[in-house]
Image: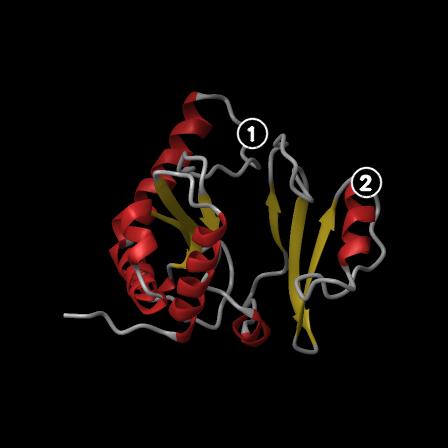
């Protein structure tokens, strides 16, 4: 039976197809993105916090190339549905193992990375959802990422998500001067960069 798909699944299907058309050289295409796991723990969907999971999957390039956008949307839905409460618990246990056995500072955040040269990064959260979320009793949600070498705009940074004010969620980031200049240069070219306020570096 074909799985029912959402608008977001269709969007991800389109993104996957677009990405594949630009990267046809790899044997496998890896799909990797954060998702809302509140459904696995009966947590209301209008709260945002440390309740997410990194979902991963892969398709052979041969199969991938033959899929329509609708079929890729169904594949996206299938990968989401396979992520269960047990997967979230396993990720938590993995982090606890590193904290206890590897002498890792408790403020470091770890992810189970899916290795491969061809990856597609996306999310199941979009602007309309973010604008309707609230933080309940939370004051600040803070994420610290370790330094990573790479050519991305922000290869190393830390970000803090603050409670919404007048319906607007504020996200602050700390980054280098070079990264700030890069973001400023993209502000008028990308819908992903809305406003860049005063940042200290």
Residue 28, placed above or below residue 82: above
The x, y position of residue 44, in whole percent, is 41, 71
Q: Does 56 sit left or right of 155 as displayed?
A: left
Q: Is 188 left, or right, of 128 in this rendering?
A: right
Outermost residue on the left side: it is 1
Residue 178 shows which numbered tag?
A: 2
Image coordinates of residue 124 in percent, x first then y, are 45, 63
| Residue 163, image quadrant | bottom right
Q: Quadrant of residue 153?
A: top right
* Identity of the residue drawn at 68% across and 41% down: 157
Marks 1 and 2 sit apart, C-alpha to C-alpha, by 28 Å
Question: Left or right: where does residue 17 sit relative to residue 173?
Answer: left
Q: Quadrant of residue 196?
A: bottom right
Q: Of the residues under marks 1 and 2, which one precedes in the sequence?
A: 1
Instruction: Kindly identify which residue carries mark 1.
Output: 105
Q: Position of residue 43 (x, y in %)?
A: 38, 66
Residue at 68% of width from left, 66% of height from top?
191
Between 103 and 144, the residue placed more toward the observer is: 144
């Amino acid at each position: 039976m074909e799985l029912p798909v959402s608008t977001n699944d269709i969007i991800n299907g389109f993104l996957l197809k677009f990405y594949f058309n630009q990267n046809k050289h790899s044997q496998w295409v890896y799909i990797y993105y954060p998702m809302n796991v509140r459904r696995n723990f009966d947590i209301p969907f209008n709260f945002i916090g440390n309740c997410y999971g990194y979902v991963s999957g892969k398709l052979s390039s041969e199969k991938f190339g033959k899929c329509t956008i609708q079929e890729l949307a169904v594949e996206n839905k299938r990968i989401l549905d396979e992520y269960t409460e047990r997967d979230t618990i396993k990720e938590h246990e993995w982090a606890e193992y590193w904290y206890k056995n590897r002498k890792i500072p408790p403020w470091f955040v770890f992810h189970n990375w899916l290795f491969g040269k061809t990856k597609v990064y996306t999310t199941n959260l979009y602007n309309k959802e973010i604008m309707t979320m609230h933080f309940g009793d939370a004051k600040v949600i803070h994420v610290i990422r370790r330094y990573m070498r790479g050519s991305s705009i922000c290869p190393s940074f830390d970000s803090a998500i603050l409670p919404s004010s007048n319906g607007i969620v504020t996200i602050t980031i700390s980054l280098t001067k070079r990264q700030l200049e890069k973001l400023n240069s993209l502000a008028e070219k990308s819908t992903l960069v809305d406003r860049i306020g005063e940042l200290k570096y």
